[in-house]
Image: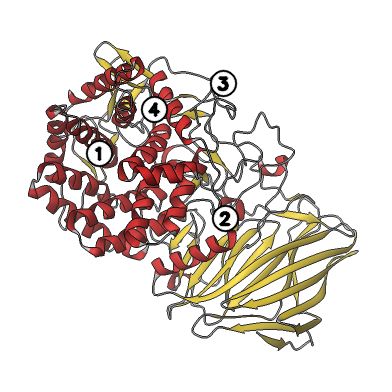
Amino acid sequence: MHVLTNADGSFGLSVTAPGGASAAQTAPLRATVWPGQADAEPVTVSGGYESLRGTGGEWLGTGRLEATSGAELEFADRWTLEEETMRLRREVRVHGDASGGFTSVAALRVVDARPWPQMEWFAPGMIYGNFDHMRDNSFGAGNYYEPGNYTVWIREDRMPAPLLATRLPNGATLAVLNSSPDSRTTAAESQSFSREPMVGAEFRFGAILAEERPDGTTLGYAVPGSEGTLSYGLKGGGETGATAEQQWRHRFNPLTDGFTQRYEVTFRFDRAAGTNELITRSWRWAWSVLDPRPNPQDIHTMRTTMVDVLAENFIQVNDRAGVRFVTPARPLGGREHPDSKVVLGFTGYALGCAEMMLVEAARDPESQRSQVLVRNAERAIDSFLRRPVAPPLDEGFMLGSGEPVASTWPTGRMLTSEQSIYLRSFTDDMKSLLRAYEREQAAGRERTAWLDWVRTFADWLLTQEQPGGGFPRSWHALTGELFSASTTGTYNAVPLYAQLYRITGHEPYRSAAVRAGEFAWASDDHAHSHGRFTGGTIDNPDVVDKEAATIALEAYLALHTLTGDEVWLDRARIAADVAETWMYIWNVPMPEDADAEDLDWKHGAPTVGIQLIATGHSLNDAYMAWDVESYARLAGATGDSHYLDVARILLHNTKAMVGTPEDHRGTRGPGWQQEHYSFTLPRGFGRHREWLPWVTVSHLRGINDLIDYDAELYDELATG
């Protein structure tokens, strides 16, 4: 670290990291000040240190800024250099009283930075690389980029880790992390989408930031966490994402004599060969600093009660049967549709529900409970074996009327050929049925019709293969004609064909799996080789999302098993490394003054292990509960114990809001969980309090797949 002397006699600082990025700041004291009038714009004040001295490996910088008439901000910054990191512990004290409020900023300018599009960026759950497959009007998107005038401030409670990293074309990297997050706030602030300025002494949350200006690019952290120039509103329906606007959402602490901010932020100087290494190295560093811990749950009890939830929601009408698509998860209920649809894969998992009932029944096959589970599962499967899949014409049916349905089309509305049906919906549940088939075969029960139905679809799907091995995203309902030729979801087909080859030995299935895997890895516009995992969630457009990385992980592990080629294990590691960055590794506190009964996510429940869903909005869920086995398998294959740490957290922490016999956690009872939550605006709430089948299937699949892989390891993790 070097001291910079400014023309006015004040001091700045610079840091040169051998082989890594260099950074400097001539004006380390910075604040945004709002005078308090509704029509007044905030202003930025900045300056150098009045004093900057180094003693015993620590540098102390002090100085004052005039905030407004009647109030000054006194800064005391303690900088510590440790290997490749530089940590700032800051204290800002207000002297005097004034209306309005302030936000303090700690930021470093990246030496030799290039324009934003020429650098690679990583913000967990937000930005992966650059503008590719970013939804317009999402944080870090290209549609509002202006050279020399680009601002990205993101509230940290939106982020799985309060982390932002960038990579220069020469491979040097700089990352910023809130290394000791607090993030407390009030119910009034955190449960409102208001873009009006707010001032509160209780606002402890921050914002991670990057700014491109004509004189350079800075990375840093601000307290409290204003966000802009873009800010999200309430999430819309379907593919609309959040209702984002180019408008600041300013948050300030008060200009009250004696009020003091205290926070810590750490910068890291490193190198990375490409986007994937930028992601992995930055994330592993954040993990080591934030140190996420398991939140132990009674996995055995939860397993049995979650199967009971599936059984409770099983319905049969004439020759149609299945687990209903949606129902209220809260104890007082809600509006029920008079008829329910049953759908394949994604959010419906009709055959996944049947698979999980069969697995549970096999544990005690003579019991009455098990016999009912088997009967219900068989009836649900039989209901789908009658539906055409070459080509497929729908994703399911209404239980009452028998009318065809699609998962993303509202229940009760007539399906037309204008709607789409998705590759993922079919591959998700074809895999479910194949796993059930293999278990039944091992038990000596012949299920030829199940295999034949899946093969009928798989053989038809081969006719849809595009040059190079890609598969389309979707087809028109009722006609089976091509709807979207986008190949971003090609990885969905890989595990299905790998399973089919394992069962049948039919070479075209093996070839298709390998071609699809190579295509997903290397395709120019959405290559996994460059950290772009896109197109997983069918109710979002082709954007970067979590589920793309998790299914790609499953795909690459399947290809490693299929071929024995270590290249697929390397690719599985990259998919796993990206997938886990969607998982919260710090605890976001619920507002202390929020009504405990109203909160969907309860006071004191750790948020570690819950994951964001997709770029463009900030809802989160427990989807990755099903990935427990993938991370455990990867740990065994690579010898990297970090993946076992991830598996343990995914097994336990994802169930923090699953009802137990002792504590229903705001749900209808044991085994119930609502679909999603928000840890940012509105903190502690979801868009709805509904249960969907995928929630339970994800939990049960994670448990059952791990038992199938290694029962002793399951016992170790489940009790740990």
Residue type, mark 2 in image = Leu
The answer to whether residue 486 is seen in the rendering is no
Choose the circle earlier in sequence order: 1 or 4. Answer: 4
Q: For the point 11% across and 40% down, which residue is it?
A: 459
Residue 9 located left or right of residue 539: right
Choose the circle earlier in sequence order: 4 or 2. Answer: 2
Q: CA distance from mark 4 to mark 2?
A: 30 Å
- Residue 124 against residue 80 in the figure, above or below: above
Q: CA distance from mark 1 to mark 4?
A: 25 Å
Which secondary structure, mark 1? helix
Task: Mark 1 vs mark 4: give the one in front.
Answer: 1
Q: Which residue is mark 3?
A: 331
Q: Quadrant of residue 15?
A: bottom right
- Percent x, y of residue 680: 60, 46
Q: Which residue is mark 1?
A: 431
Circle 1 packing at 10 Å, graded few (<14), some (14-19), many (20+), is: many
Which secondary structure, mark 2? loop
- Residue 430 against residue 277 in the figure, above or below: above
Choose the circle earlier in sequence order: 3 or 4. Answer: 3
Task: Mark 2 vs mark 3: give the one in front.
Answer: 3
Which secondary structure, mark 4? loop
- Residue 345 against residue 720 in the figure, above or below: above
The answer to whether the residue labelled 2 contacts the one labelled 3, judged by CB atoms less than 8 Å apart, is no
Choose the circle earlier in sequence order: 3 or 1. Answer: 3
Q: For the point 47% across and 31% down, which residue is it?
A: 302
Q: CA distance from mark 2 to mark 1?
A: 40 Å
Q: Which residue is mark 2?
A: 230
Disc on res. 410: 4
Residue type, mark 4 in image = Pro
